[in-house]
Image (cartoon, rainbow, N blue to C red):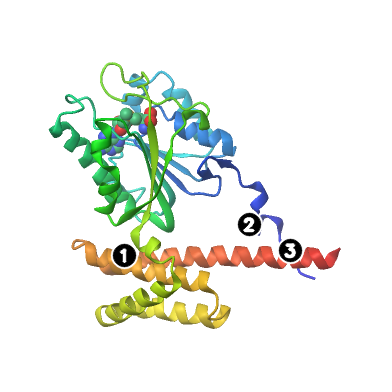
Amino acid sequence: MWRYEEQTVWSKNEMKWVKHYNSENEILLVGEGDFSFGLSLATAFGSATNIVATSLDSYDDLIKKYNGAATNLLILHSYGAQLLHGVDATKMQFHPYLQNRKFDRIIYNFPHAGFIGLENDPQVIEIHRNLVRGFLKNASCMLRFNGEVHVTHKTTTPFDSWNIEELGTQSSLQLLECVKFNIQDYPGYNNKRGDGKRSDEPFPLRKCNTFKFVLSSNLHHQNPLQDQEITSQTTNARQVMNPVFQIFREYFDHARLTYGITDEYLLSNVRNMLAIGFERCKAEDGVDPLNDYINHLKEIQYMSKLRIANLRNSLLEVDQRYAL
Ligand SMILES: C[S@@+](CC[C@H](N)C(=O)[O-])C[C@H]1O[C@@H](n2cnc3c(N)ncnc32)[C@H](O)[C@@H]1O
């Protein structure tokens, strides 16, 4: 009879949820104000070891701006969060502690470039849009294959003219859904103006939504037939263009031999990785394709670990059933 050590088993029972987020997600928080959103998640999860919470402000500026920041940061730290300051959302993929890291959820609540003019001034709107565009572009490179980028934003005029969905499309992100945002879902969260003399004050929320994005290539892959077609195109192109592709191919063949050709979940995951790598290399002139592939290999390794954990769980269930 098999016995697996308790801590090696992926326990679904212990997973805690807050609205769209769970305690197993690796979460990156961007553009935090007084860090009360991060603390709200950490308190509900009872841990923040999977949370990286960041601000553009330095630590010293945060303390000056927000009354609650020092305490919030202290508690978040005690929950095990990684706290980073001086993180620019439009360059974050190159931050020394963030490069090569991938997340399940990347969240920016109420992006805003500061009070630089009237909110309905087209030039001001463009500055805000550039911030969101830069954030989404960076976030799209830091997502796990099945990850999501969430932007919470006001949907009243003139904020609706930021056209968040279009900004996502420009970074190979596709809108998965757009859901109403209720601050009550996050006890302890205080939304902050974040700029000027009244930084620590809240702003009226009125109507606002959470825009959830996924990598466009993932949505394309929900139809297995379409999946097959894209993969074969991608496969041919990459085979010709880069010998590193062979690593994926071997992995793919090995996975198919091990788990069988009918395992559509497994096959589509590997295909997604191929397609994402291909899209990235095509889109990013400046990026070293080899480095990009290495990051994808790390993701594939992550998926392998996930599968092993699931297999262990299944075996444990069988074990327990026969033990009765
Ligand atoms: C309206 S406040 C929202 C703050 C916080 N997310 C909240 O919900 O309370 C906008 C935030 O965006 C941050 N911000 C502005 N430009 C940024 C950038 N380039 N990178 C990261 N954060 C930025 C500001 O420092 C400020 O904290």
**Dot 3: element:** helix
* Residue under pointer 1: 292
Residue 49 relative to residue 179: left or right = right
Residue 232 or residue 141, whichever sits in front:
232
Q: Is residue 190 visible?
A: yes
Residue type at the position of mark 2? Trp
Whether 146 is drawn above or below 197: the answer is below
Residue appearing at x 27%, y 53% in the figure? 169
> Crowding near pointer 2: few (<14 within 10 Å), some, many (20+)?
some
Whether 34 is drawn above or below 146: the answer is above
**Dot 1: element:** helix
Q: What x and y, as percent, mark residue 319?
A: 77, 67
Of callouts 1 and 3, the N-terminal one? 1
Residue 298 or residue 253, whichever sits in front:
253
Of callouts 2 and 1, the N-terminal one? 2
Picture disc at residue 10: 2
Picture disc at residue 317: 3
